[in-house]
Amino acid sequence: MSSRIEQLVADVDALLATADAELSRRYPGDRGRRQPVHTVYLPADQYGEQTVATWGREALDLLDTHHGAFAELTTGLGLAPSLTDDLDRRVRDKLAREPVEDLRIDFEDGYGSRPDDEEDAAAIDAARVLAASAAAGTAPPYAGLRFKSLESPTRRRGLRTLDLFVAELVDLGGLPTGFVVTLPKVTSVDQVAAMVHCCARLETAHGLPERLRFEIQVETPQSILGPDGTALVAPMIQAAAGRCTGLHYGTYDYSAACGIAASQQSMGHPAADHAKAVMQVAAAGTGVHLSDGSTNVLPVGDDAAVRAAWELHARLVRRSLERGFYQGWDLHPGQLVSRYAAVFVFFREGLPAAAERLRAYVGETDSGYLDEPATAVALAGFVVHGVECGAVDEAEAVELTGIAATGLRALARRAGETPGRAASEGPPG
């Protein structure tokens, strides 16, 4: 280039140096970590060493008892009858091997208000169980606690529980891999900044070598729209100073706060869609994962009731996946059946086209699509996500795409460690 252009480039580099640094800091891109397909919220007093395995067995028992309803569910999901047996096998394997991908031991709404000595004991007991499970290799890939909010009435109790829980884990060997804390009912950016302060103080007090990380639960209208009309969830992510791992939509608290009748409260309500669209744009490029909420319609009762609950849940899960929300909440063992059925169908259904487009992109051949680099990253991410959750076998993904497993992960920008089942492992059989 001419000296004139060289000087112009140098001038622009200087003018944009601060903006370039801010862009890299605020929008680092994908963290390269596995995202669980769900979070199971469990009241702290119901958590024990066998809880995760018990949830898997109860889900399998329900699948056996209502297998006809499951067959009807798979038909409703658009799965060809010839593929039903494969889906049944994959779901059963998942329920036996890794029924829960992410567990949140709940000291908030699911636990309620208890005497201090009772909650103190529950916090210590739950931490001991989690530590024992992590040591035995039976803990989910991700686990942590939801403590009471930083709102004034619950602030002291919430922080006391958080401190007791973390202290016990440290005494028993440290935080498990994939440990995360949920910060509920956030109403201001200041609360997120206060949470960062709390994390730093806890790290110092307990000698933690790693950083505490947390999720922001978006379940108040104040998280979406502040008093000055700004979307506060975006500055909340920035105020977290790199500690925020996810934004979780809270279906029922948010809906109730918006004045929506109980019978109409749903992940699919227009008010929910608006909140989640704001969350999605705020999180884009930050490396913060998105999670949809839950449905409180449980698969219990006779065959017709279980089938109806499964169909509703599966439809809502599919709807979330189609909108870019790859995670949601599950509240009952029976919901694991419809969760994994919907997730597996989604990834298996999209696998052939995604693989064909990736093969063409890497081989620079015609696929009928003019895919750009960003789309190739998304296609690879789709395939890798399918492998990580068990919907797709790694060998199958490699064969269909023509890309080695390491190449797929690199293209998907999944360089980070993956808690739980490694991507190279596939379902047995």
Image (spheres, rainbow, N blue to C red):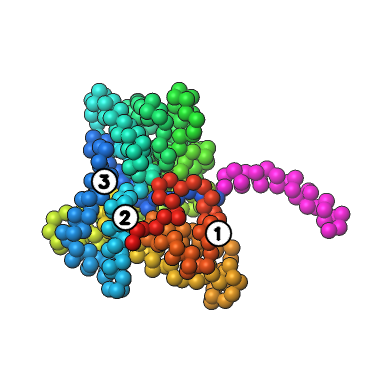
Mark 2 neighbour density, 10 Å: few (under 14) some (14–19) many (20 or more) = many
Label of residue 407 in the image: 1
Kind of residue indicated by mark 2 = Lys
Mark 3 neighbour density, 10 Å: few (under 14) some (14–19) many (20 or more) = some
Q: Give the Cα separation between the discs numbered 3 and 1.
A: 34 Å
Q: Which residues are magenta?
A: 1-28
SS category of the residue bearing label 2: helix
From the image, tell me which residue sits under label 3.
53
Quadrant of res 67? bottom left
Going from N to C along the chain, the mark reached first, 3 or 1, is: 3
422 relative to 82 in the view: left or right: right
The residue sitting at 61% across, 47% down in the picture is 23
SS category of the residue bearing label 3: helix
From the image, tell me which residue sits under label 2.
94
Q: Nearer the viewer, residue 223 or 122?
A: 122
Quadrant of res 43? top left
308 relative to 256 in the view: left or right: left
